[in-house]
Structure formats: C-alpha cells, structure tokens
C-alpha cells in the first residue's frame, strides 16, 4: 500500500494533468519563391489575427476593459500578455486577469493559458494628456501543434471624456476555460485521498481518539449529535485551510510566479524547499510552526469548550494552525505548488479537499468509536516516508527542466534505489502476504534504478525509456548534435543555403523553429533525432530558420511563404522548387514525416 500512496502523492504534488497538443497536421500554402498553390491538408491553421481577436470593450479615465475572442482549440499564454499606453502620460497601475487553465510542459514548465475568451481589466493612473492607443502584446498556440510568434496590436482608445469604445472583438463568448473542470476535479480527488493518507501517520493517528474526546466532551451523546460536532470541527479546520490556500494563491498571482518558474534560480529554490520537506518526513528534523505562534494557538484550543458546535468549529480552526510534523511538510509542499499556480480559487478548493480528507476518519471515530482505527505499527512510518519520496520526486521533476538530461536520469535512478531499499530490498527476514509483494516491488525498483543509472552514463535522459540509445533501430540520436541542421536567422541566409543546394543538385528541407515553440521540441526529440529519419534526411541540404527573436525580416519571410509560425517543414526538389503538397505545418506522426520525406526524395 505504501507504493500506491507514493504514486498518489507524486501525482498530487506534480500536477493534476499534463497538457498534450498532438493532432497531426500539414498544409500546402505556397511556394518558397512566390508561387502559390492551395491543396488539401489534414489541418488548416488560421492567421494569428483570426485565431485571436482583441478589442476594447470599455474605456474610462481610470479603467480600460478589453476582450480577446479566441477560436476553439487555440489558446493564449498568460505570461506573454503585456499592455502599454501610447500617446499620453497616463500609466497602467494594475492588470487584472482571470484564472486560466494550468498546463505543464516538460520543456517550459508550468504555464497558464486561456481558451475561448479572455476579459482583461486595466487600472489607469490618468495623466494630464490621455492616451490615444493601447499597445497589446500576446502569444498563442493551436492545440494541433502550431505556435504563433509573439504578436503586437494597437487598439484605438476614445478621446478624453468618452466612456466606451467599439471593441471589434466580435460577440462575447463564455470565458470558462475548456478542460479546467476535469483538471480541477482530478486534483481535488487526489488531495482528498492525500488527506486520508496523512491521517495514517505515526504522529496523527494516535491523536484521533484524543481529538474525538475533546470535540465531543466527556458526556455520552447520540450519533447525530456526534456527527454534528465532529463535522463542525472538520469544517472549521477545512475553511481555515481554504482561506490559507486562497491567500497563497493570491500572493502567487500577484508575483506571477507561474511565469517566473521558468527561471533556473526559482526552480532551484523550489526544489530545495521540497528536499527540506522530504527530510522532515524522514525524521531528519521536525518542521513545525514557530513557538510564538504555536503556543498561543494551543492555549486557545485548550480553552475552547468541547461538546458545543461553535466550540468544535473554533477548535477545528485553531488545530489547523498547530499542525504536527507529519502534516507540515506535505502541507508546505502543497502551498508552494499553489503559490506557483497563482490560482486563489483553486488553491482554496484544493486545501479544503485536503482538510476534508484528513477529517473523515475523525468523523467516523466520533460516530462509531475508536474500534474502527487500525492498529499502530511500523506501517505508520512507511506511510510518512512515502510522502517523503513523493516530495523528492517533485524536486527532481522541477530540476530536470534546467539540469542536463543524463543528470536528471541519474537522480531518478537514485530515488528508485532509495524506494527499493525502503521496501525491503536487503531485508532477509521471512515475509508473507503483503511483505512478499513489497519485496517484489523493491526488486523491480532496483532493476529500474540500475537501468536508469546505466542509461544516464550512456548519455540518455528519458526516465520512461532509460535505455533508448541501446535499442538499435528504435533508438534516438542525441539531440546535442546541433550541427545536423544549418541554423540561420535571416531570410537571406535561407536563400543562400537553398541556392547552394540547387547548384549542387541536391534536394533541400527548410525547418521553421523557435525556442518558445513547444511542438518544435517534441518534433526534434520524437522525429528528427530518430535514426530512420536521419537516414533519409542525410540526402537533403538541411536548413533551420530560427524565428525566436521574431524580427521584421523573419515576419516578412513568414508572410511571403504564407506561414503562421513554427513548427513547419518545406521540401524542395533538386531544381530548388518547393513541393507544395509535401509542406508540413504543425505536429505530425513520425510515419507521416517519413512518408513525406521519401516522397520528396523520389520527386527530386
């Protein structure tokens, strides 16, 4: 059972769900040298101004409200939104954004995005001269695997004294982000289960009957009364937890931590926090509130009157301020995560679910007696240590975005080795039942640890495929071979490379890429680095146009080629002419890419 709880906590503290944008697509929209040809394609992407339409809804001297209408299956990044007044001396003092959808990407970390519609409110400190335009910078992507370059639009503001402006943003739509409900419900379920698991730790479980007697008082009462009192206690505790979660969420939103999490320094600090919390779960030290806070709270709790509903609620609220060492570390980890999301409402709900999970055993014991409690034993410490391993897993998950891949794989190997030892890998005492299952699991973790360590030494980085480079034809090639594509940043450099390919009588491939393009990273790892793809691409002159900086020259080239953004691939024959029906835009499966590549070789 400790293994199950470990997996549960790892899921809990990591994130509720990982976002995927995997619909394959390609489009034939033009020729590299100005010829146009519209052909059928599996995915047709919209121009950026059609996918995201911004407009002013209302403009006053001290307030501006604007709206983005977002086409379904497209989304905007929260941390890419920037606003600036033009033409006056006023100043934007506050930007109010609604909660969006949390997405976790293995390359760029935790981000928050908006689907369908986005309403933004700007607080203005007016100056002597009113602004006449609002400069809006944004960036978005399509679920089908296309990332648009950062975009800037100028929105006209009404003259001084005007109260509103035509938005031009189209009809208003529901701004409830799609997919948010399912992600939230999953995280609430996981946190409720984590609260239950926290009860079965050595410093909490023995307190349950003591707390029950304090809540109910010394008199014998019937079950309905016992249920009402214990529920009051649990709700008092849960509401206090929810308030803390909301405050932490607001604090995180104010600092825009979800965007700052891209910084290696911030990720490193957060990882250190999780390691400290894990050490507390391994009893290296006790993590508790300072005495000057804990002491007065304990005194107030002792004076609260048991047996009354208000008294029980007060005791529940105060008990949440005096959490035990077993609860402190996971709770602190949850607070760190909530601060990173910047979601006040979600933070309140998540900690409320955690507290309700912790309170369920208390209600059951109050109603049916302490005979329901399991017996104490070494398994209590195993539950607590499972939380510790989960916290360490989160620390590694944070660090693997900023440290070399082989090093992160070595850390996963070390974690798996620690779990194997904890499960009894070297325990030679006879075991039966669940003990044998634990030893079998320990052996599997040991095998994985050895494979991961061996893979790390071989230069691999994927914890799900630690031995991928040893698998023959199915392996991938290290992405460190950055010279495989000739990387350029200007349209003239692209034309120069293609002219050389034409003179040499070789087919060519042009890749459109950028550092901020998530799908580009996926294609690089899953397609370009694969040996079967490399074997075919060896016959091409390979050019990569990096549009990370989104310069005017790059934007002009994108417009000329009728491309909206990366990723995209253009195949050219030996005469230097693009083969429009083989153009790829967005993510595609490896098999599709190979089919197009082979067709380009045959056509050349």
Image (cartoon, grey):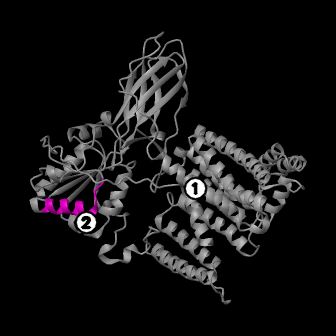
Q: Residue at x 29, y 50 (%)?
A: 586
Which mark is on residue 189?
1
In-image side of 350 versus 142 (left or right): right
Which mark is on residue 533?
2
In-image side of 110 versus 319 (left or right): left
N-terminal of the pair, mark 1 or mark 2, is: 1
| Whether residue 450 can be seen here | yes
Classify 407 as above or below 154: below
Residue 180 on image: x %, y %: 48, 46
In-image side of 291 versus 84 (left or right): right
Q: Is residue 4 magenta?
A: no
Q: Residue at x 54, y 18 (%)?
A: 62
Viewer-closest of 265 and 95: 95
1 and 2 marks in contact (CB < 8 Å): no
In-image side of 78 versus 278 (left or right): left
Helix, strand or loop at disc 1? helix
Magenta part of the protein: which range?
Answer: 587-601
Residue 111 on image: x %, y %: 49, 47
Residue 213 on image: x %, y %: 85, 58
Classify 45 as above or below 576: above
Q: Residue at x 76, y 52 (%)?
A: 224
| Whether residue 263 can be seen here | no
Cα–Cα gap, marks 1 and 2: 42 Å
């Amino acid at each position: 059972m400790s293994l199950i709880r470990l997996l549960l906590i790892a899921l809990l503290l990591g994130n509720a769900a990982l976002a995927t944008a995997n619909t394959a697509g390609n489009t034939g929209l033009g020729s590299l040298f100005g010829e146009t040809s519209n052909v059928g394609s599996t995915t047709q992407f919209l121009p950026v101004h059609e996918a995201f339409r911004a407009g002013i809804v209302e403009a006053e001297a001290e307030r501006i409200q604007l709206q983005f209408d977002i086409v379904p299956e497209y989304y905007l990044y929260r941390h890419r939104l920037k606003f600036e007044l033009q033409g006056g001396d006023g100043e934007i003092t506050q930007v109010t954004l609604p909660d969006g959808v949390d997405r976790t990407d293995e390359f760029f970390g935790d981000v928050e995005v908006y689907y369908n519609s986005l309403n933004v409110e700007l607080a203005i400190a007016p100056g002597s001269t009113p602004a006449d335009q609002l400069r809006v910078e944004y960036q978005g992507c399509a679920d089908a695997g296309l990332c648009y370059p950062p975009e800037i639009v100028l929105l006209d503001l009404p003259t001084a004294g005007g109260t509103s402006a035509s938005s031009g943003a189209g009809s208003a739509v529901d701004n409830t982000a799609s997919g948010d409900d399912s992600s939230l419900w999953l995280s609430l379920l996981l946190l409720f289960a984590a609260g239950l698991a926290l009860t079965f730790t050595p410093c909490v479980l023995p307190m349950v009957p003591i707390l029950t007697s304090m809540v109910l008082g010394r008199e014998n009462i019937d079950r309905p009364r016992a249920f009402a009192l214990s529920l009051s206690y649990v709700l008092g505790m849960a509401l206090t937890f929810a308030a803390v979660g909301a405050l932490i969420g607001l604090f995180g939103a104010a600092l825009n931590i979800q965007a700052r999490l891209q910084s290696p320094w911030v990720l490193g600090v957060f990882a250190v926090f999780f390691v400290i919390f894990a050490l507390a779960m391994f009893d290296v030290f006790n993590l508790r509130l300072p005495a000057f806070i804990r002491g007065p709270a304990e005194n107030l709790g002792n004076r609260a009157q048991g047996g009354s509903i208000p008294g029980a609620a007060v005791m529940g609220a105060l008990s949440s301020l005096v959490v035990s060492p077993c609860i402190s570390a996971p709770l602190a980890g949850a607070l760190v995560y909530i601060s990173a999301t910047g979601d006040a409402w979600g933070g309140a709900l998540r900690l409320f679910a955690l507290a309700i999970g912790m309170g369920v055993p208390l209600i059951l014991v109050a109603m049916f007696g302490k005979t329901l409690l399991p017996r104490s034993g070494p398994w209590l410490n195993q539950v607590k240590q499972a939380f510790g391993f989960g916290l360490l897993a989160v620390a590694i998950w944070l660090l693997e975005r900023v440290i070399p891949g082989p090093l992160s794989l070595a850390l996963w190997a070390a974690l798996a080795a620690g779990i194997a030892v904890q499960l009894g890998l070297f325990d030679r005492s006879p075991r039966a039942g669940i003990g044998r299952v634990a030893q079998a699991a320990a052996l599997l973790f040991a095998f994985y640890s050895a494979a991961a360590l061996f893979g790390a030494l071989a230069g691999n980085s994927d914890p799900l495929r630690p031995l991928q480079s040893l698998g023959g034809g199915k392996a991938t090639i290290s992405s460190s071979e950055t010279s495989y594509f000739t990387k350029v940043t200007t349209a003239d450099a692209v034309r120069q490379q293609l002219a050389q390919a034409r003179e040499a009588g070789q087919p060519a491939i042009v890749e459109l890429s950028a550092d901020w393009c998530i799908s580009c990273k996926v294609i690089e790892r899953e397609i370009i680095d694969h040996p079967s793809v490399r074997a075919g691409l060896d016959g091409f002159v390979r050019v990569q146009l990096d549009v990370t900086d989104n310069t005017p020259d790059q934007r002009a080239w994108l417009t000329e080629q009728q491309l909206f953004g990366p990723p995209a691939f253009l195949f050219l024959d030996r005469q230097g002419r693009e083969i429009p029906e083989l153009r790829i835009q967005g993510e595609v499966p490896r098999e599709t890419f190979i089919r197009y590549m082979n067709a380009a070789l045959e056509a050349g």
